[in-house]
Amino acid sequence: MEGEAIGTVISVTKQWWLKVNTKPVRAHALDGAVFPHVIKVRYTVEGRDYIKRKWIGAGRPVPGVGSAVKVVYRKEKPAKARMS
């Protein structure tokens, strides 16, 4: 069984070490480069706080710090969750 909670983004980190080039020919090293991100989301289930990390691929929209995210978790083990 699954439950839903609303989580808050507490951290957004750009992974500088993993560059994805989007142009075949570049004028300089970062021309056309996009980077993936890792976000940390804090959510509460039955009075207990949990923190979940999610990797977001390069070029995808990244939520800002403080924005709300829907979290779907397992009722028997709330630490197991996914974000949509």
Image (tube, rainbow, N blue to C red):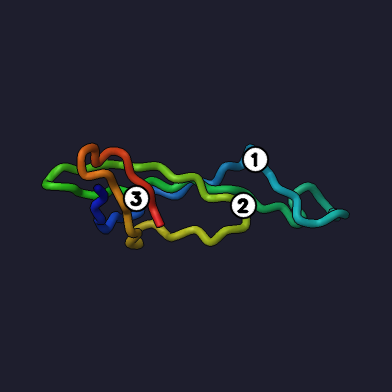
Q: Quadrant of the C terminus?
A: bottom left
Q: Which residue is mark 1?
A: 18
Q: Which residue is mark 3?
A: 10
Q: Residue at x 43, y 48 (%)?
A: 39
Q: Is residue 18 above or below residue 61?
A: above
Q: Which residue is mark 2?
A: 58
User: What distance separates the C-alpha of mark 3 from that of mark 2?
Assistant: 20 Å
**Residue 78 x %, y %:** 24, 41
Q: Residue at x 30, y 55 (%)?
A: 8
Viewer-proximal residue among 71 and 42: 71
Viewer-proximal residue among 64 and 56: 56
Q: Which comes sooner in the sequence, label 3 or label 1?
A: 3
**Residue 28 x %, y %:** 82, 51
10 Å crowding of disc 1: few (<14), some (14-19), many (20+): few
Type of the residue with mark 2: Ala
Callout 3 touching callout 1 (CB < 8 Å): no
Q: Which comes sooner in the sequence, label 2 or label 1?
A: 1
Judged from this view, the residue extending furthest toward the right is 25
Callout 2 touching callout 1 (CB < 8 Å): yes
Residue 26 in the figure: left or right of residue 67: right
User: What distance separates the C-alpha of mark 3 from that of mark 1?
Assistant: 22 Å
